[in-house]
Image (spheres, helix red, strand yellow):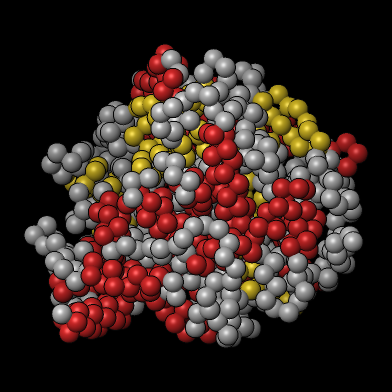
């Protein structure tokens, strides 16, 4: 059999980790990335990565990490894969430290841990407040080492357009475009991994990077892979609201002692501490975001009458803050001007993370053989709400699962992509070339960036923290209207060299397709669970809705199916944070 | 004085072969803008000050919070990230944007910075791990040393230090502070230092540490305030010592 090859799309943490796992088995990888992989969005993660290392004398355990994650996710996550992730977490941190991550250390030189939201024990390893950057760089360095050995070939500045799927519904490669030369070509491979991250750009302004359009995930959704739990979008409570983007102020700020407050009756009011005495400022993100929303929007008590409250670090020692939160202090000071060591930061919730994503099984296989997904673009580990510092973990962990899963798939293959009829590749290539040519010729009146702005505005307004069915319905109608208006877009750039205009127009359509998945998924789910909150249905409804949403693409819009959640390890209980409501903290003996 | 308009003068170039030209744009002033948000504003209505509809300006950006390094360009002559160049903090008058000059132009403000990544290969900027499996607890590390190493590890390969360095130019093989400082970093790591000699030898030849002219421009422009002068001084000491020891062993 000819030499096998794997195509990894996405050079963030998950894609790089999977790459390392695959090349360690001697199998070469073609790595496709929109940007030089070192600039991937994983760098934006700040606060840390969870693992029950139990180095703080608190009797922590991987079971407790598992339970907190399931409880924090409002019991929507399948339990066995989450259990496996939490069990593997300490080993992953150990490896990352060996690979060069400069994690903060204790006075004895061991890995230091800090507190994060939704938990009672110190479980978060961190490298200042740039943990994602440090983890990504270590993976980038390891991959560069394999690149120097000839096992990895990087295609940076290339965009994934679609998967090549043969007549037996098996994935045989991809079609991608070089964003500089605009060349469109086929990459043949025995397996394809989509590790392309979240899709915050659908909301216009979010904490995400500009590359996080979800375009690749949307593309394979349109090719028949279901998108799961799209309605679960995390809104981070402490964002710095900007005109161009909402910058994140890490949850670590609260974990290290930061307090949220606003004025009530002329006096500071620490509303999280008052409402949630058991957890105080370190309640999970959905809880904190809703509380801040309530205080500002419903009670009208935002600072200076605006939608903002204080995140206050000024009572903490400045040297302590520098070594543990330096990265975010710098961002706040650079973009806002005030020194958070001296003046409380002004924050408001911001769109942050997609719990939902491409539907995969526990080995990260999609419903199409040969096509895999991992990282934020899958839906596996966070249920209805993600705990802080679990995203870096799930990104890396899913990489360590999908890598070996791909290797296993390769071993059991009977033919390679080279044995596949050339027409299979040619027809998909033609399809993408045709699509591209059509966009080049668009000469209508609509500006794609303005259309995108309008879509983002309405998504943030109606498909954010608080959701009403009437508004969701209206939003979906509006989205269909945008899709009509899309056809009337005019291209401003007619160059065939580094044309960012055409690329964005293509991504915009894919964003619109996913926006409908999110909006309609939210519309149908008549309950409140984790990040998904409907005042008209303000309770969790396990009887009807303890299930995974699966959206399938059809020409008329998404068609929904629902799937049982695996709750074989712990029983769902009501999720509360005013008292310690966790009932499965200790492992059943 | 409050600006009425934000007035940009941009050095544009259609492709690597063509000649650069200047184009100006005016955008109505709003507070709290930065250079990226203005470029985004322009693409919603790409019309220059002569009233001509033109192709939107091409530039790179990604994180918009000064961690990815993508949007580096010359702003009023200084290499820096466009996302953190706040309009309200720039001097009044025309804001001049140019592509970095030490890297080949791709189009407009976008340049090709690939050689920085290639230099990371030359200096072996990685830890030689045996594999990505669990080997138990990692070696301990002194927190004070860790803090210095962490400063160095925040380099985002943006290229500001190379742009500002008088010794990095088309006539010189000098690799610049970005790659050199990574040698100091990996030689501090408890496992990384096991391959210390290989890295030192990689920077002892032409284009390496001896070509540093110690102008210290790199430290002045580094957006992450990485102590590059200390990093390079430490490297200089190490290579000198390694050189003498190597000579004594002969």
Toward the viewer: A295 or A289?
A289
Image: A564 above or below B7: above
Residue A506: image x %, image y %? 45, 30
Q: Where residue A354 sits in the image (x, y, percent)?
A: 63, 46
Q: Would residue B156 appear left or right of A231 to someone viewing this image?
A: left
The residue furthest left is B171
Q: Quadrant of residue B240?
A: bottom left
The residue at 40%/16% (across/down) is A422
Q: Position of residue A290 (x, y in %)?
A: 74, 56
Q: Quadrant of the C terminus of chain A?
A: bottom right
Name the residue located 62 percent from the left edge and 35 percent from the top edge. A365
Residue in the picture at 77% in, 74% down: A59
Asked if residue A417 lies left or right of residue B17, the reply is right
When asked about the image quadrant of residue B43, the answer is top left
Say which residue appears at 84% left-offset and 46% top-offset.
Answer: A568
- Compared with A448, A84 (above or below) is below
Residue A89: in sight, yes or no?
Answer: yes
**Quarter the N terminus of chain A occupies:** top left
Given residues A273 and A549, the one toward you in this image is A549
* Total marks in image: 0
Say if residue A306 shows up in the picture: no
- Side (left or right) of A486 relative to A551: left
**Residue B2 location, x and y as percent?**
38, 63
């Amino acid at each position: 059999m000819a030499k096998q090859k794997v195509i990894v799309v996405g050079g963030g943490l998950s894609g790089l980790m999977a790459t390392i796992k695959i090349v360690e088995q001697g199998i070469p990888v073609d790595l496709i990335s929109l940007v030089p992989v070192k600039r991937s969005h994983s760098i934006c993660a700040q606060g840390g990565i969870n693992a029950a290392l139990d180095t703080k004398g608190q009797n922590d355990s991987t079971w407790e990490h598992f339970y907190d994650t399931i409880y924090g996710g409002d019991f929507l996550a399948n339990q066995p894969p989450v259990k496996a992730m939490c069990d593997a977490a300490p080993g992953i941190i150990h490896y990352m430290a060996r690979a060069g991550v400069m994690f903060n250390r204790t006075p004895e030189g061991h890995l230091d841990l800090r507190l994060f939201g939704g938990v009672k024990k110190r479980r978060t390893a961190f490298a200042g407040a740039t943990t994602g950057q440090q983890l990504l760089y270590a993976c980038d360095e390891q991959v560069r080492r394999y690149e120097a050995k000839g096992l990895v070939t990087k295609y940076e500045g290339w965009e994934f357009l679609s998967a090549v799927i043969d007549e037996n519904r098996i994935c045989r490669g991809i079609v991608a475009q070089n964003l500089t030369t605009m060349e469109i070509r086929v990459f043949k491979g025995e397996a394809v991994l989509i590790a392309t991250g979240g899709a915050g750009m659908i909301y216009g302004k979010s904490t995400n990077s500009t590359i996080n359009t979800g375009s690749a995930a949307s593309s394979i959704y349109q090719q028949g892979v279901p998108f799961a739990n799209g309605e679960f979008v995390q809104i981070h409570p402490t964002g710095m609201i900007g005109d161009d983007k909402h910058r994140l102020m890490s949850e670590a700020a609260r974990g290290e002692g930061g307090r949220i407050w606003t004025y009530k009756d002329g006096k500071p009011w620490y509303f999280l501490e008052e409402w949630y005495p058991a957890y105080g400022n370190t309640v999970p993100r959905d809880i904190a975001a809703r509380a801040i929303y309530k205080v500002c929007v419903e009670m009208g008590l935002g600072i200076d009458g605006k939608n903002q409250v204080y995140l206050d670090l000024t009572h903490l020692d400045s040297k302590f803050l520098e070594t543990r939160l330096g990265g975010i202090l710098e961002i706040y000071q650079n973009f806002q001007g005030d020194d958070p060591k001296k003046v409380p930061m002004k924050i408001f919730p911001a769109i942050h993370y997609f719990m939902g994503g491409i539907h995969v099984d526990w080995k990260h296989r999609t419903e199409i053989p040969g096509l895999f997904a991992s990282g934020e673009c899958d839906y596996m580990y966070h249920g209805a709400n993600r705990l802080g510092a679990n995203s870096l973990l799930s990104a890396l962990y899913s990489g360590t699962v999908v890598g070996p899963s791909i290797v296993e798939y390769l071993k059991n293959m009977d033919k390679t992509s080279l044995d596949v009829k050339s027409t299979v590749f040619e027809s998909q290539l033609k399809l993408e070339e045709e699509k591209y040519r059509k966009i080049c010729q668009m000469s209508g009146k609509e500006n794609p960036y303005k259309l995108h702005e309008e879509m983002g505005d309405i998504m943030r307004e109606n498909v954010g923290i608080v959701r009403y069915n009437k508004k969701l319905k209206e939003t979906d109608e509006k989205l269909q209207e945008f899709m009509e208006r899309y056809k009337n877009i005019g291209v401003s750039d007619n160059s065939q060299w580094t044309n960012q205009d055409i690329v964005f127009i293509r991504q915009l359509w894919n964003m619109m397709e996913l926006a409908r998945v999110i909006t309609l998924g939210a519309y149908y789910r008549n309950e409140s669970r984790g990040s998904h909150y409907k005042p008209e249905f303000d309770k969790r409804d396990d009887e009807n809705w303890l299930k995974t949403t699966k959206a399938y693409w059809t020409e008329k819009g998404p068609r929904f199916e629902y799937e049982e959640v695996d709750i074989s390890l712990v029983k769902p209980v009501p999720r509360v944070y005013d008292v310690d409501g966790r009932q499965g903290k200790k492992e059943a003996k | 004085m409050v600006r009425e308009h934000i007035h940009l003068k941009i050095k544009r170039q259609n492709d690597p072969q063509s000649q650069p030209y200047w184009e100006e744009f005016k955008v109505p002033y709003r507070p709290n803008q930065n250079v990226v948000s203005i470029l985004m504003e322009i693409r919603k209505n790409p019309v220059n000050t002569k009233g001509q509809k033109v192709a939107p300006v091409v530039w790179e950006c990604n994180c918009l919070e000064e961690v990815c390094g993508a949007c580096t360009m010359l702003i009023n002559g200084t290499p820096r990230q466009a996302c953190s160049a706040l309009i309200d903090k720039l001097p009044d008058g025309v804001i001049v944007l140019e592509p970095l000059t030490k890297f080949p132009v791709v189009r407009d403000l976008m340049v090709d910075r690939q050689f920085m990544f290639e230099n990371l290969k030359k200096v072996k900027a990685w830890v030689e791990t045996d594999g990505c499996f669990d080997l138990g607890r990692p070696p301990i590390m002194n927190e004070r040393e860790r803090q210095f190493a962490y400063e160095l590890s925040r380099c985002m390969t943006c290229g500001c230090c190379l742009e500002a360095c008088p010794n990095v130019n088309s006539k010189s093989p000098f690799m610049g502070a970005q790659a050199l400082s990574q040698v100091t970093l990996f030689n501090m790591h408890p496992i990384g230092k096991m391959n210390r000699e290989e890295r030192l030898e990689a920077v002892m030849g032409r284009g390496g540490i001896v070509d540093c002219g110690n102008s210290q421009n790199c430290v002045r422009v580094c957006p992450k305030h990485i102590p590059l002068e200390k990093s390079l001084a430490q490297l200089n000491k190490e290579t000198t010592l390694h050189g003498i020891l190597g000579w004594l062993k002969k």
